[in-house]
Image (cartoon, helix red, strand yellow):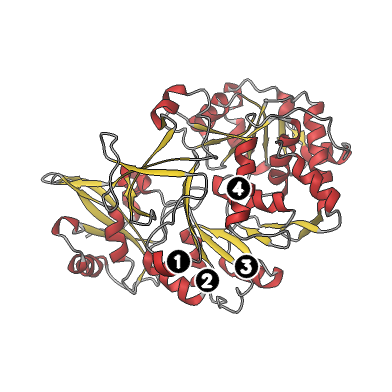
Amino acid sequence: MNIGTLPERNARCRPHYTGVIFEDQRFSWREFNGRINRLANVLLGLGITKSDKVATILPNCLELLETYWAVAKIGAVVVPLSQLTRGKGLVSMLRDSDSVCVITDSGFMEHLDAVRGELSIPDHRYFLTDGSPTAGYQDYQALTAAASDDEPPGIEISDSDPYNIMYTSGTTGQPKGIIHTHQIRTMYGTLMSNYFRATRESVFYHSGAIVFNGAFVTLMPAFFLAARYILHRQFNAERFIETVRQEKVTHVMMVPSQIIAMMHAPNFSAEALQSLEMLMTLGAPLHQEHKDELARLLPQRLYELYGLTEGFLTILDKADFPTKSKSVGDPPALFEMRIMDENGRDLPAGEVGEIVGRGPILMPGYYKRPDLTAEAIVDGWLKTGDMGYVDEDGYLYLVDRKKDMIISGGINVYPRDIEEIAVQHPAVSEVAVFGIPHDRWGETPVAAVILREPGAATAEELRDWINERISARFQRVNSVVIMEDFPRSTAGKTLKRVMREPYWAGRETRI
């Protein structure tokens, strides 16, 4: 079950069909498979063998997409790292992953050069994908241009062989590398194709970061089906809409911040997006206010996916949205879910507890961390660390992330409950609620907001408006912080932990 066979099959079955589009470059499946083969043969020539780890530190680019498939063909393991990873965190991840090769670009050279002395990677295994030949780096473009585009020698791959290691952290000294096998990524392709009603004539489009695991939710089905996959360097709301219109895109996935930006773009219209059959939100909860507006403007298209990179998910299907819009759906076939209390006992419908699940995409573990794996997976069940409840039909309703819960005066306060109120204010575009220390209550909620228009409301007005509408006194926000933008991860997720850090204080307006 080698996923690296997919591009070769696509090149054989649909050789002249435009399979991959990056920016203004268009490639038939035969052409793109040839590019993958050239890189695979370069890596083999440098002594990269089965199970060797190849790290990438790249933005969205053709070379990153090629690497994902080239390593699969030769049985190596890709370690995609964000270009936001620097210093000790970068060293920690490269060491922990046992990476023997690094592919990056000129924009990241200074950060990599600063730590190369702390790594044991041979000098001839550093690649630069752009710019002129540079001392200490292999020229990616020159090497691949000179390489053969023949299929690399057949390498035996089993279902359980690792394909990638996705890191969730590393700045704390305890990086967690999530292993995905070839079988797991195969399940991404087959499972998602089925649930998204996708066919080989579908057109998938992605403009978020593909180092984010969520990107594989559409990447794998596109290659599994030999459909069309469009990738852009970065997200731009106006360009996103225009690309959907021009290319007749059928399937997209977006994080909430991208959806909000799209809905507020000057060229947004239902007509421009009429080709869409699926608009999936994932990565963070999309607040109900935005869900309802999107469903009104683009009916029968919205899906929502709740999931963990470690290997559990639920999907709210577009057909279920009218009756279950406040839920994040139910587990797909072959998945199981439980809601458990702090003592590990199952809770009945309607009661809030920790979401626990298992299924065919469950990771075999964290790389070289059996201790952390044993904490996360207990008796074959993944402990998500998220809080929620199910209804009588088994549909999941997220309450909040366990780590984001605020304990104020001994009472559990769920930030999402407050966020759902705050986002209804006409001046508010986005909101994030988190706890700060309080002498009397231990913690107290603070609401950070992004306004639709600068000056549309004051922090004091928003605080009073929110507090007048919340259902319980202990949910009252202590203050409101107005920001131009939120700190976000490469995947576009709001980083509440960064908001709590002292250095952030100089950027806010407090009352």
For the residues bearing labels 2 and 4, Cβ distance under 8 angstroms: no
Residue in the foreground of this view, choosing between 46 and 502:
46
**Label 1 or label 2, whichever comes before in sequence order:** 2
Residue 437 % position (x, y): 20, 44
Q: In this figure, which residue is indicated by the disc labeled 4?
A: 216
> What is the quadrant of the C terminus in the image?
bottom left
Report the amino acid beneath label 3.
Arg
Marked residue nearer the N-terminal end (4 or 3): 4
Q: Quadrant of the N terminus?
A: top right
- Could you classify mark 1 by the number of other residues whose Cα lies within 10 Å: few (under 14), some (14-19), or many (20 or more)? many
Label 2 Cα neighbours within 10 Å, binned few <14 / some 14-19 / many ≥20: some
Element carrying mark 4: helix
Q: Count of labels shown? A: 4
Q: Which amino acid, mark 4? A: Phe
Mark 2 lies on residue: 300
Q: Which mark is residue 239?
A: 3
Rendered view: 242 above or below 484: below
Query: Dot 3 surroundings within 10 Å: few (below 14), some, or many (20 or more)?
Result: some
Marks 3, 2: nearer the viewer:
2
Q: Is residue 502 visible?
A: no
Of marks 2 and 4, the one in the foreground = 2
Judging by the rendered image, the residue that carries numbered circle 1 is: 321
The earlier-in-sequence mark between 4 and 1 is 4
The Cα atoms of the two marked residues, 2 and 4, are separated by 23 Å
Asked if marks 1 and 2 touch (Cβ < 8 Å), the reply is: yes
Position of 147 compared to 351: left or right? right
3 or 1: mark nearer the eye: 1
Circles 4, 1 touching at the beta carbon (< 8 Å): no
Q: Residue at x 65, y 36 (%)?
A: 182
